[in-house]
Image (tube, coloured by chain):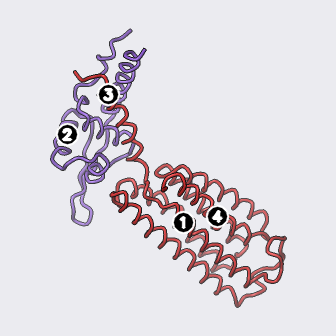
Amino acid sequence: MKNPFESLDKVLEHSVRLQIMSVLVANDSYDFNSLKEVIGSTDGALATHIKALEKEKYISVSKSFVDRKPNTKYRVTERGRKIFKAHLDGLEQLIKQQKG
Amino acid sequence: MKEINEYEKDLASIRSIMERSVKFISLSGLSGVLSGIYALVGAWIAYQTIYSPLSPVGYDHVSILDHPASIFKLEVTGFLVLLSSLTTGFLMSLQKARKMQTSLWSSTSRQLMKDLAIPLVAGGIFILVLLVREYYVLLVPATLLFYGLALVQSSRNTFSEVMYLGLTEIILGLISAMLPGYGLILWAVGFGAMHILYGAIMYFRYER
């Protein structure tokens, strides 16, 4: 059997990143403030982790203006979706092996 | 490398976050019950205007066209029912959102609004056209069908009860299209009784 640790992703080890990805995989797009609220994180921490995910091309960012206020929306990329799914499968297998 | 129970925690948090991020949970069930009561009051006024003292349940051959003077009264009644339901729904959801310390205005609620708005605006304009052209026989089916479609469309962003309420409204709308004489009673069931029923289910499941 394949070692489940292989499908775990280093970038997603961090739980805030994993949470950001969960929200974006479940929704078409999400803005910064809504993301902050649903995850319950601070501005700074959230921005850092979003940057990390963006750098790895797991998520894409689109900026626009609504009533002259900047409105930033995040979307998951195909690459991000694939890696996230593999990471989840890895987690599941890992837990199954430990329990079985 | 993390401990195994940390991975378990990760998995659990993913599940709850996905659920919370997709669903608009500030929707108040109790406001649904109140809207149902408003609708029943409205239906009762309409019944008094058109049918009384005929039985409200039987197949009625009475038409609103027999009472042209009361059409305006019914339009005002309908508008007031709509207005009071929307206001109650908004205020009680605002209150629920405050209690849960979340905001009413989020990615999820905006998506919900968009999904609701398209069928409701289309239906609203269609109903105004029906009123202007005096196709009164289609009014009840049109309100039930468009409302039902809007609910089904928006249900992916809120409680699953909303989808069942929507399907019920669609079925009632189709029945009323076939049985025009039962229009008022089917309208009272769809907008009155069903709102009370589903609102109460949501209240007991999520708000207590």
What is the CA distance from the residue labelled 4 to the residue labelled 3?
Answer: 44 Å
What is the CA distance from the residue labelled 1 to the residue labelled 4?
Answer: 13 Å
Q: Residue B144 carries which label?
A: 4
Chain hosting mark 4: B
User: Could you tell me which residue is drawn at 21 percent across and 65 percent down?
Assistant: A68
Q: Do labels 1 and 2 share a chain?
A: no
Would residue B89 be found to the left or right of residue A94 on screen? right
Chain hosting mark 2: A
Q: How would you rate the neighbour count of disc 4 (Cα within 10 Å): few for under 14, some for 14-19, many for 20 or more?
A: many
Chain letter matching colour purple: A
Mark 1 against mark 3, which lies toward the viewer? 3
Give the labeled residue for mark 3: A83
Mark 3 against mark 2, which lies toward the viewer? 2
Q: Where is residue B55 in the image (x, y as percent from the top left)?
A: 83, 76
Chain letter matching colour red: B
Q: For numbered disc 1, what is the local secondary structure?
A: helix
Give the labeled residue for mark 1: B122
Mark 1 against mark 2, which lies toward the viewer? 2
Q: Do labels 1 and 3 share a chain?
A: no
Q: Residue A49 carries which label?
A: 2
